[in-house]
Image: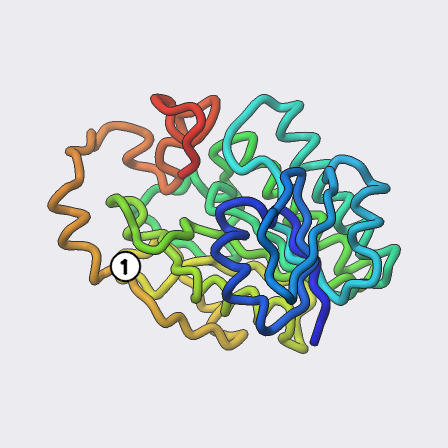
């Protein structure tokens, strides 16, 4: 059984993934916040991603890394820089120093958030980040590419849409991914023998998707879920949208107009 370091394990995505993955891997969970209830196949190591020595220590003896950690919404540049820029660099440098050959990097749909919703894009589309947060994820994808080419640290970068039990609004009908579909992608990223540096979209088989995810399909991804069974209820309860609003026109939604959080009316809400 492979031993896998999961950073940001106390966050929402980590909470969804842990029960999906802990029977397949021995999980070393890392975060700034303690995780009080651990499964028998989990252990916790506190680490600040901005501290290279702490990251190097947390990564010792593992076979792979799932890098979820960082600041997950828009915020001030120093906060984004320390958590997402320095933190991601430290993860890849720890992988290089320890000889860890595989990293799954939790990138984001906000790397391409300024593309219009009328356009279908794929893994080869040029990044158009909608926030400083999105810029930090573009940086992470670039670091992954560098470390693959220069040091042999293989990566799959997953541009995650929205992980939840079900989609909650019109935008999420396009970008939603179920926990089990994301776990399937993560497993491919950790175990597929032919990955060097790949970019895929973290999205279920949604009929309303804006993303061509053929690169994930090429690697064996077969999503089990779709947002469509939830569409009727979501659309019936959705508030009217302003068609002239940037947030409505862009794939990144409210991130495209926010300066903190994911919704300018709710500074602490992540979308």
Closer to the camera, 158 or 215? 158
How many residues crowd around disc 1 within 10 Å: few (fewer than 14), some, or many (20 or more)? many
Residue sitting at x 47%, y 73%: 221
Q: From what the image shows, is residue 246 above or below residue 210?
A: above
Q: Quadrant of the N terminus?
A: bottom right
Rendered location of residue 237, percent (x, y): 14, 42
Which of the colour schemes (rainbow, by chain, secondary structure, one colour) is used? rainbow
Asked if residue 28 lies left or right of residue 250, the reply is right
Which image quarter: residue 211? Answer: bottom left
Closer to the camera, 15 or 211? 15
Q: Quadrant of the C terminus?
A: top left
Label 1 SS? loop
Residue sitting at x 84%, y 49%: 57
Q: From what the image shows, is residue 147 above or below residue 251?
A: below
Residue sitting at x 77%, y 60%: 149
Residue sitting at x 67%, y 30%: 81
């Amino acid at each position: 059984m492979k031993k896998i370091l999961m950073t940001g394990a106390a966050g929402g995505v980590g909470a969804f993934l842990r029960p999906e993955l802990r029977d397949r891997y021995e999980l070393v969970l890392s975060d700034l916040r303690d995780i009080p209830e651990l499964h028998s196949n989990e252990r916790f190591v506190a680490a600040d991603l901005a501290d290279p020595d702490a990251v190097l220590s947390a990564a010792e003896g593992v076979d792979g890394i799932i890098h979820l950690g960082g600041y997950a919404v828009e915020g001030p540049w120093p906060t984004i820089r320390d958590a997402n820029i320095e933190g991601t660099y430290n993860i890849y440098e720890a992988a290089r120093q320890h000889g860890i050959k595989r990293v799954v990097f939790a990138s984001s749909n906000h790397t391409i958030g300024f593309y219009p919703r009328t356009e279908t894009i794929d893994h080869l589309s040029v990044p158009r980040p909608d926030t400083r947060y999105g810029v930090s994820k573009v940086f992470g994808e670039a670091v992954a590419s560098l470390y693959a080419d220069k040091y042999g640290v293989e990566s799959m970068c997953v541009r995650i849409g929205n992980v939840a039990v079900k989609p909650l609004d019109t935008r999420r009908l396009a970008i939603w991914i179920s926990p089990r579909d994301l776990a399937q992608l993560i497993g491919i990223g950790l175990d597929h023998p032919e990955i060097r540096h790949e970019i895929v979209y973290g999205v279920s088989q949604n009929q309303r998707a804006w993303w061509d995810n053929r690169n994930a399909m090429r690697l064996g991804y077969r999503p089990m879920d779709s947002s469509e069974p939830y569409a009727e209820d979501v659309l019936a309860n959705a508030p009217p949208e302003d068609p002239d609003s940037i947030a409505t026109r862009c794939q990144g939604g409210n991130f495209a107009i926010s300066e903190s959080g994911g919704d300018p009316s709710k500074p602490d809400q992540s979308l």
